[in-house]
Amino acid sequence: MSLARYADQGLFSPRKIAEILLTTSEDIARTAGLGKDAVQRKDRIRSDKTQRRLREVTEIINKVEPRFGSALIAYAWYRSEPLPGFSGLTAMQLVRDGRANEVLEYIDAVDAGIHA
């Protein structure tokens, strides 16, 4: 799927992300490691940090969605499946710790057949 479906007027939209994933904007904020006001106040939604974290979450979900068949199952994986080699941490925990690039690299490695 296209990342554009998560955006509105050129910005990642917490509201659109929440609609697609059948959750709330506050839940999206929590899973991205952001405060509730980061997805409620327009100036905070536009901030570099908020947009970066929303992009990271959507990139990861978008990348694994084909393997799971739906964005909802990909989101469940993101939140709850411990990743091998990361001390039992989930993709969500790694993103909240600022380690989204490691998650994306892990997914690429799995797709390339490096990790089984």
Image (tube, rainbow, N blue to C red):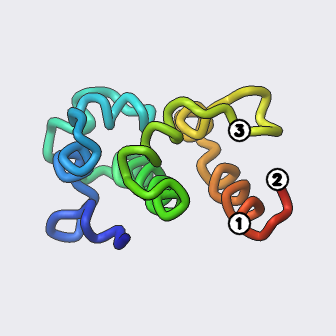
Q: Quadrant of residue 18?
A: top left
Tag 3: amino acid: Leu
- Horizontally, residue 38 falls left or right of residue 59, namely left
Residue bearing the label numbered 1: 111
Looking at the image, residue 68 lies above or below residue 78: below
Residue bearing the label numbered 2: 116
Q: CA distance from mark 1 to mark 2?
A: 9 Å
Q: Quadrant of residue 22?
A: top left
- Horizontally, residue 9 falls left or right of residue 65, namely left
- Of pointers 1 and 3, the one earlier in the residue sequence: 3
Looking at the image, residue 60 lies above or below residue 24: below
Q: Nearer the viewer, mark 3 or mark 2?
A: 2
Picture residue at 71% right of the left edge, 59% below the top? 105
Q: Which mark is residue 83?
A: 3
Q: Position of residue 57 (x, y in %)?
A: 44, 49
Picture residue at 50% right of the left edge, 54% below the top? 68
Picture residue at 24% right of the left edge, 51% below the top? 20
Q: Residues within 10 Å of mark 3 (few under 14, many from 20)?
A: some
Looking at the image, residue 106 lies above or below residue 7: above
Marks 2 and 1: in contact by CB < 8 Å? no
